[in-house]
Amino acid sequence: MVKSYLEKRWFNFYKAPKALSISVLGAILSFNCFSQATIKPNIINLTSQKTSRSVSKDIPETNSRVSAKDLKRHSIGVGIGQTFLSSELGQNGDDSITLDLYYDYSASYSFDLIINLHHSSHRIIKREATITGLAVGVKGRLFQFDAFSPFLLGGLGFYAPTVTRLKNNVLEKTPFSIAFGSHFGAGGELKLNEQFKIAGLIHFHNPFDIKQDLDKELEGSYYKLLLNTHYTF
């Protein structure tokens, strides 16, 4: 009886360390397998990132903005097209082909300073309408795809329109006077190379009404449909 009890105790004492060692060994193996399982995705992620970076370098990206080399550059352009007169200007002058001068300065990636100077005379029989303007504004590019970019522009300017109209049954030219005004437009430009670009543009000018001494105010507006060529330096 005593012998069987001792043998049973010895068997339990011998079995406990064996079970403990087996559990420890199992924990070590499971930890090793878990660490290997977590390392493999990291390696895959690293290799995929390297591959995507190398592929992205090989594929050319489409520029959505003007490049840095195009900033702080000057541009002088000549526009030729039709000028359409309205209101009293249109009553005393006919629409005709005219020339415009443009100056452009690329101030940022999206916006340019733009200055327009124009002068033209328009006749109908014995009547005449003359328009002179110096318009200053900002041109904003909407987006850029390859070498093409559509844009909007707008600003203020100084205008000096005159007309020859009847006064006491006699044709008389209104006195020269400068008025403030506004202008806006839209178009698109295509860059041919580093020095030249062309643009299509519709440009609307609205001089404020000019008061006359003993006659009614001179009012009128006009817009231009132009094809421009610019030289950049």
Image (cartoon, helix red, strand yellow):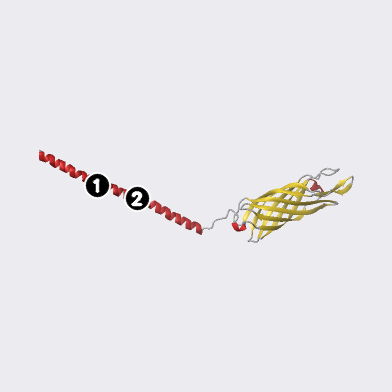
218 or 169, which lies in front? Answer: 218
Q: Position of residue 40 (x, y in %)?
A: 38, 52
Instruction: Kindly give the residue lying farthest to the top in the view shown.
Output: 1
Secondary structure type for disc 2? helix
**Which mark identifies residue 189?**
none
Q: Position of residue 147 (x, y in %)?
A: 61, 57
**Residue that mark 2 sits on:** 35
**Cα–Cα span, label 2 and label 1:** 20 Å
The reply to whether discs 2 and 1 touch (Cβ–Cβ < 8 Å) is no
Q: Residues within 10 Å of mark 1 (few under 14, many from 20)?
A: few
Q: Position of residue 134 (x, y in %)?
A: 74, 52
Horizontal relation, residue 215 to residue 59: left or right: right
14 or 220, which lies in front? Answer: 14
Q: Position of residue 164 (x, y in %)?
A: 84, 49
Find residue 76 and report its image quarter: bottom right
Secondary structure type for disc 1? helix
Q: Quadrant of the N terminus?
A: top left
Total marks placed = 2
> Residue drawn at (78%, 54%), measured in percent from left and top?
120
> Residue drawn at (24%, 45%), measured in percent from left and top?
20
Look at the image and tell me whether residue 94 can be seen: no
Look at the image and tell me whether residue 50 can be seen: yes
Q: Residues within 10 Å of mark 2 (few under 14, many from 20)?
A: few
Horizontal relation, residue 56 to residue 224: left or right: left
Find residue 70 and report its image quarter: bottom right
What amino acid type is highlighted by mark number 1? Ile
- First-in-chain label (2 vs 1): 1
Q: Quadrant of the C terminus?
A: bottom right
**Which mark identifies residue 22?**
1
What amino acid type is highlighted by mark number 2? Ser
